[in-house]
Image (spheres, helix red, strand yellow):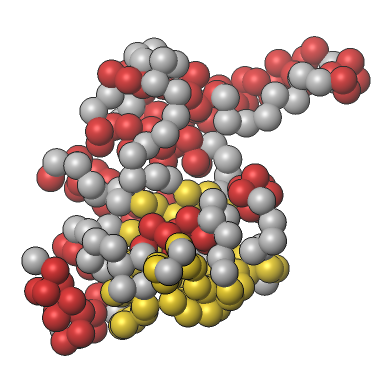
Amino acid sequence: MLQVKGLSKNFGGVQAVKNVTLEVNKGEIVGLIGPNGAGKTTLFNMISLFLTSNSGEISFLEEKIDIATPEAVVGKGLLRTFQTPVGFPKLSLLENLMVVPPNEGEGIFSIFFKKKKITRIEQDHYDKVCGLLRQFNLYEKRNELAENLSAAELKLLELCRQLMANPKIMLLDEPASGVNPIMLEKMVQHILRLRSEGMTFLVIDHNLGFIYRICDRIYCLANGELIASGTPEEISNNEKVKSVYLGAS
């Protein structure tokens, strides 16, 4: 589904990512780990086209996307979250999600839409929003401002926002960061449920217990280079990975 081949990125004289190759197959949860400064977020930013790579190529659904725009890849179904959730803090949870789908009743061609059709489309969007908020246990707070949510609830809201755009693959940046154990268990269950429904994930996180629990395969970066890949068991027993983390602690 997603292929990254020989991706590199330089910032002045610093090579943040060096010739990284990885793939994510449909229906997988793939982890990306490494100590601080390993190049994980830089790699995420290139895959989601928030950064331009210096070399290499990115393919999604067997089509090269590295010359596209972030908006174009979102339209193809590649979406990402951020370590610090983004959104609209002064809007309610309902409003945060209702702004995601395009409003088909606006624009110069709206005169060609019948009022009943526009109303039906808006109702479908509203029903989907309410369904997602219920799934993620946020429905009771639907009319609260997003700025009043906890850090963990904001991460769940961001997941809902991405799901409103009908993703085929989601890139999650530190979903477990700042999440207490009870909410983390809920996060695990949500991700596993979404995978069972056909969603594909590429996940960055420093919480190795979380990564080992949810992932089918894991890649480990250090100093911008891929040093290991394998199953959670293989990665947890890999001497290079142990050395990197022990050296970083």
Tell me: residue 10, above or below residue 131: below
Q: Residue sitting at 44 percent across and 16 percent down?
A: 91
Q: Check the image and report above or below for 235 versus 68.
A: below
Could you tell me which quadrant the N terminus lies in?
A: bottom right
Q: Residue 34 location in percent, x, y?
A: 26, 68
Which residue, as the protein is rendered here, is positioned at the far bottom? Answer: 239
Q: Residue at the location (29% across, 79% down)?
A: 231
Left or right of 108, for residue 233: left
The single residue placed furthest to the front in the displayed view is 13
Displayed quadrant of residue 102: top right
Q: Quadrant of the C terminus?
A: bottom left
Q: Is residue 229 above or below residue 130?
A: below
Q: Residue at x 44, y 77 (%)?
A: 18
Q: Measuring from the top left, give residue 86's x and y in whole percent.
A: 42, 34
Q: Nearer the viewer, residue 157 or 34?
A: 34
Q: Relative to the observer, which residue lies in front, 88 or 249?
A: 249
> Is 34 positioned to the left or the right of 191 in the image?
left
**Depth check, front residue: 87 or 119:** 87
Left or right placement of residue 137 versus residue 161 in this view: left
- Res 229 quadrant in image: bottom left
Residue under the image location 30 percent in, 51 percent down: 174
Q: How many marks?
A: 0
The location of residue 74, given as percent across then percent down, is 61, 48
Q: Residue furthest right?
A: 112
On the picture, is 1 further left or further right than 91?
A: right
Q: Can residue 201 be seen in this view?
A: no
Residue 223: tell me if it is visible. Answer: yes
Give x and y (percent) for residue 75. Answer: 66, 47
